[in-house]
Amino acid sequence: MKIKNIVSLSLICFTFGNLSAQNPWPKTTETAKPWTRWWWMGNGVDEKGLDKQLTTLHKAGFGGVEIVPIYGAKGFEKQYINYLSPEWMKMLQFTTNKAKSLQMGVDMAVGTGWPIGGPQVKEEDAATKIIVQTYTVSSGEKFSDKIVLKDEKQKNLQTIKLDIVTAYNEKNEAVVLTDKVTNDGFLNWKPGSGKWTIYAVFAGKTLQKVKRAAPGGEGYTLDHFSPDAMKDYLKTFDKAFGNSNYGIRSFFNDSYEVYNADWTPDFKNEFKKRRGYDLSPYIKYLVSNEENEITGRVKSDYRETLSELILHNFTEDFTRWAHSKNSKNTNQAHGSPGNLLDLYAAVDIPESETFGSTVFEIPGLRRDSADVQKSDIPDINMLKFASSAANITGKKLISNETFTWLTEHFKTSWSQAKPEVEQVFLSGINHVFYHGTTYTPADVPFPGWLFYASVNFVPENSLWPHLKALNSYVERTQSVLQSGKSDNEVLIYWPVYDQWANPKGKDVAFKVHNIEKWLQPTPFYSDLVKLGKMGYSLDMVSDKMIGEAKSENHKIQVSNGGSAYQVLIIPELTYLPETTLNNILKLAQNGASIIFQNGPKDIPGNFEIEKRRTRLQSLWAQIQFQNQNKNLKTATFGKGKIVLSSDVEKGLEYLKIEREKLTDTGLKFIRRDFDGGKYYYLVNHTSKEINQFIPLNYIGKQTTIMNPGNGDFGVAQTQNNSVRIQLKSGESLILKNSQNLDPSVSNWKYVEKKGSPVILDKAWQLSFKEGGPELPKSRNLMKLEPWTNFSEDPATQSFSGTGVYTTTFNLKKKNADDYLLKFDKLYESAKVMVNGQEAGIVWSIPFEINIGKYVKKGKNTVQIEVCNLMANRIRDMDQKKIQWRNYHEINFVNINYKPFDASNWKVQPSGLDGEIQLILIQYSK
């Protein structure tokens, strides 16, 4: 067994980040740092406050802000500024100028609150819905009703339009009567024999207004399907911005949360143009929930039309407009009734969203069931819709709204945030936006202005002094994940037509909040989970993308700047358009490898069914399969190969598509390709430590281990295409596998032996540095305890801030390579000072830190500055009925959207507990 890179004698004096070594970390930019959504409450901002908060954010390690104006705080109405007014634009210009001086970026929402809309949205451009009225009439009867809209909520609207009138007899024979209705609602028609039901379809308005709107942003939500609404809407921005973009890097649009919008005034004509037939004779099937074939087919065509309209009339128009301002655009496509992959691909920066808290197996990671969302658990495969679209089309940045409702207010620690953001990174996202930060004027007392669905990344947060540690971790990780390009080998088709063919409902909204209905029950999702656990890296692909793809050198590529893939998987499905099958076969003809889990059963839609079905069958018959073994058929097709097997693993093995076997250990990973090598980002979310050689599909000539937690790096031990790693539960690292050797980089320090731990059991002094409402009394401790244990001092129960634990220990001789300071229980994070020097911040599991370079022979002083949660101070304020939440609109709610009240909370433990150990470390020689 040959082992490369045996540790040399120079290791003894090596220190991580050696200035003489070439630093392997990519050059960082403001984009690599985390950004934060920045709520301007009531637009009540001024230059002094903007300057102060931007400077504070910069010092904490943020790279940029995303301005989203929302409702304001009561009592501050005189400070409100109307959105896009000259005064507001002046504040925007000041913001971007100040940010530029700090080397920060600024994005902004194209609207206030959400979803997109505002005062410029006139009635004709407002979100539109179908309103259906039915009438019955029999042969020989005179139809005396007037076909006019009876909805009282709509009666004062000027744009109500009767779109379709169709009558059906008992045999479901249809007669279109639209042109038989007079302007005043009289029907000029006599029914034939039998009983008839008349369906009258009106284009009405949802009447939905912008939620959480800021001053100057109130108004109707937009009709996303209209060819004119978005263009009309953006004219207000053209007027405000003129020929400048005011320093905005990217214009942002929040998630589609438009309710009951399922129509647009010109929908009937658009449907006929796009689907090839008139919807009018089939309108009964669209508005009913009959579970029959024709209903599913009509609804599939309807939903496909909605998808195309939101893509072409909203998303692409949005992108063109942003480019006209020499800016980019960012869009959250989820929640919409469109094909998410195509919508994400149509913008510069696709953005996904995590909402709620994930269950991790990491020992010691707090997750109190009372403090998390019951229904929403983030799913890595939902996030992959955005990253797939970006990877396929060659977009460099994929963003994510991160930490929305991670826990109950004031109870989120940075240790809880770390695995959550790691899951985001593992999905392929590389540009996170925290959710978020609220602008607060300098004269507003604790806790400042706060938003109701946020982890509070605000300077008033008692954990703020240690936030730089989390942000530095994110920055180092994203600097790697933004380098090169994604290196996924598998494409998997999203069978959206199986979703669209559901005979129930009308529009199908692909929401983050209901994946248990539309994503998780599908065979497609089962494949995503199985392939991920097996170690395959994949992206999802749409019908449109397959149509744009080419096959060269046995690789599939959709865009010249996008990733190239080794195989395309068509999961188990019912409906596949004949055009998509034809495009798949073209790829195979030119050398691509394709896996079908089953033969397509039918074509979707209601146009020329038999003709298109025959075409589908004819195309499938062109594939001459040969039996290989049970459940595996193969065919050579042109220059490519086609495999048919319900077992996708068998198909991949047959095609010799290699998986990364490192996932057999439980490790998670993502891989990036750069010029001259590959990066692996590895995360241990298992409950155990992993200390072994792990296999990699790519090693290169030199593997450098890089620790995103502290920036350390060194050359790894490798053997037989494996690399040695040591990862405790909750830890992560990056492997840089390069074809180039760099002899200046010293070897990585592997822990070979640990000495018996020394317990720091001398007396401790506890004092308090900063926080409120008042500092507790200092005290001497015979053993470590949280300061909340000392209830005889009422200030310990209400205090949120920084407590300082100080002790000493004697080191008879300094004969270890390093010394590890290990915490038993930490509430919540700590800055460690050893002999007056800062050793670092302990903020994530495992709670430990190397302090070898700071200890000395003889007496050593350790000072541990612990920050606790905001919860106890908020609890105290609510018990004393001190008013701090006083906002317009929703005011302030808890995680279950009930009025917030912390007065009955238990006191959250704060400080240190248990033992602190000093462990002697010997590294490999």
Image (tube, rainbow, N blue to C red):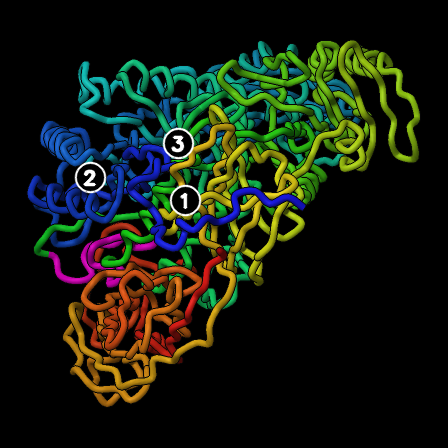
Res 589 quadrant in image: top right
Q: Is residue 905 visible?
A: yes
Q: Residue at x 56, y 27 (%)?
A: 339
Q: Is residue 233 left or right of residue 556?
A: left
Q: Earlier in the sequence, mark 3 or mark 1?
A: 3
Q: Residue at x 53, y 36 (%)?
A: 671
Residue 791 appears at what percent x and percent y?
Answer: 27, 87
Q: Which residue is mark 2?
A: 215
Few, some or many C-alpha atoms within 10 Å of disc 1 (few <14, some 14-19, many ≥20)?
many
Residue 253 appears at what percent x and percent y?
Answer: 36, 31
Q: Earlier in the sequence, mark 2 or mark 3?
A: 3
Closer-to-camera residue (612/64): 64
Cβ atoms at labels 3 and 1 below 8 Å apart: no
Q: Earlier in the sequence, mark 1 or mark 2?
A: 2
Q: Residue at x 32, y 45 (%)?
A: 18
Residue 410 appears at what percent x and percent y?
Answer: 32, 63
Few, some or many C-alpha atoms within 10 Å of disc 3 (few <14, some 14-19, many ≥20)?
few
Relative to 613, say whether 806 is above or below: below
For discs 1 and 2, the disc positioned in front in the rendered view: 1
Q: On residue 155, which mark appears? A: 3
Relative to 804, say whether 16 is above or below: above
**Residue found farthest to the front:** 9
Q: Is residue 884 left or right of residue 721?
A: left
Q: Which residue is mark 1?
A: 746
Closer-to-camera residue (634/334): 634
| Majority secondary structure of magenta residues | loop
Report the span colored magenta.
Answer: 444-463
